[in-house]
Amino acid sequence: MKAYLSNRWSKVGLGLVIFGWSPLWLIVFLSEIGLWPDPNPNPIGPGLLFFVTFWPAIGCLAIGGVQVWRQRS
């Protein structure tokens, strides 16, 4: 796990996940527990951010995983 987290591609992928996915999941979580002002939110901005960062994040995480796997073998 330490080798995976030290890989540059993995760091970029995790950064994209944190930056791009957190706002949407935070709104979903807060609305579920009742702390968001709208009980049925329609977060367009965070949804678009999630959409734009989803596949690049998955790609970076996959490239990082393959690189770490190839270094270990």
Image (spheres, grey):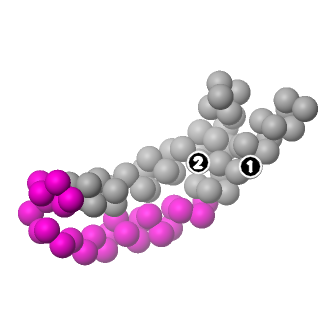
- Residue 5 drawn above or below residue 41: above
Q: Nearer the viewer, residue 14 or 69?
A: 69
- Distance between the alpha carbons at the discs numbered 1 and 2: 9 Å
Q: Label 1 crowding class (10 Å Cα cut-off): few <14, some 14-19, many 20+? A: some
- Residue 20: image quadrant is bottom left
Q: Quadrant of the N terminus?
A: top right
Tell me the magenta residue range.
Answer: 31-56
Describe the element under mark 1 as helix, strand or loop.
helix
Residue in the image at 34% along x and 60% along y: 24
Kindly identify the amino acid type of the residue bearing the numbered disc 1.
Ile
Residue in the image at 65% along x and 24% along y: 2
Residue in the image at 44% along x and 47% along y: 18
Q: Position of residue 30 (x, y in %)?
A: 20, 54
Residue 22 falls left or right of residue 71? left
Is residue 52 among what the camera can see?
A: yes
| Residue tagged 2 | 13
What mark, if any, has residue 17 been given in the picture?
none
| Residue tagged 1 | 63
Q: Label 2 crowding class (10 Å Cα cut-off): few <14, some 14-19, many 20+? A: many
Q: Is residue 42 magenta?
A: yes
- Residue 19 drawn above or below residue 39: above
Is residue 6 among what the camera can see?
A: no
Q: Position of residue 7 (x, y in %)?
A: 69, 34
Q: Residue furthest right?
A: 73
Labels 1 and 2: the sequence-earlier one:
2
Residue in the image at 42% along x and 56% along y: 21
Q: Position of residue 36 (x, y in %)?
A: 13, 59
Describe the element under mark 2 as helix, strand or loop.
helix
Residue 66 falls left or right of residue 7? right
Q: Is residue 12 magenta?
A: no
Q: Position of residue 16 (x, y in %)?
A: 51, 51
- Do residues under tags 1 and 2 come within 8 Å of each other at their CB atoms? yes
